[in-house]
Image: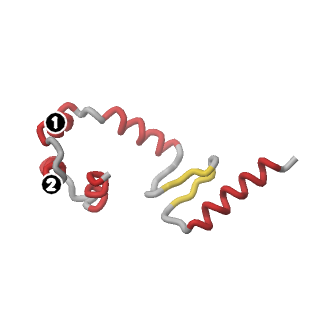
């Protein structure tokens, strides 16, 4: 997660050298990291995630789904509570 946070904080201005630099700053094994970048080890997983996001029309961060209901953006707790309660109410209705 620290690496994720670093990338998210610097989105839009990242190149390969920056990615490796972040890995080094965080104490990751840069040899393994460079090899994974070169072999594109995670490419298929990222492409699957992107395809799913497109299908679900999840265009913003964060995007949440509560029983299929899309909630976009950082929302207060009450928004999630209302969504959950609404779905529970529907489920309990005869």
Residue 5: % across, % down: 30, 57
Residue found 18% across the figure and 45% down from its top? 28
* Residue labelled with disc 2: 25
> Nearest the camera: 85 or 68?
85
Circles 1 and 2 in contact, beta carbons < 8 Å:
no
Numbered badge on residue 32: 1
Q: Is residue 48 left or right of residue 88?
A: left
| SS label for mark 1 | helix
Q: Residue extending furthest right?
A: 94
Q: CA distance from mark 1 to mark 2?
A: 15 Å
Question: Quadrant of the rendered structure where residue 70 is?
Answer: bottom right
Name which residue lies at 26% across and 57% down: 6
Mark identifier at residue 82: none
Crowd tier of the residue under label 2, counting other residues whose Cα lies within 10 Å: few below 14, some 14–19, many 20 or above: few
User: Residue 14 vs residue 45: left or right?
Assistant: left
- Helix, strand or loop under label 2: helix
Instruction: Please name the residue shown 42% across and 40% down the image.
Output: 49
Q: Is residue 69 left or right of residue 49?
A: right
Decide if residue 13 is on the left or right side of residue 92.
left
- Mark 1 or mark 2, earlier in chain: 2
Q: Residue at x 44, y 39 (%)?
A: 51
Residue 91, position in %: x, y?
77, 47
Q: Position of residue 71 (x, y in %)?
A: 56, 58
- Percent across and percent down for residue 89 are 77, 54
């Amino acid at each position: 997660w620290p690496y994720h946070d670093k990338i998210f904080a610097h989105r839009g201005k990242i190149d390969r050298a920056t990615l490796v630099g972040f890995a080094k700053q965080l104490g990751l094994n840069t040899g393994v990291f460079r090899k994974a970048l070169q072999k594109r080890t995670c490419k298929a997983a990222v492409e699957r995630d992107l395809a799913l996001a497109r299908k679900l029309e999840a265009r913003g961060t964060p995007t949440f789904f509560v029983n299929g209901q899309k909630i976009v953006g950082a929302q207060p707790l009450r928004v999630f509570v209302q969504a959950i309660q609404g779905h529970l109410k529907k489920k309990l209705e005869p």
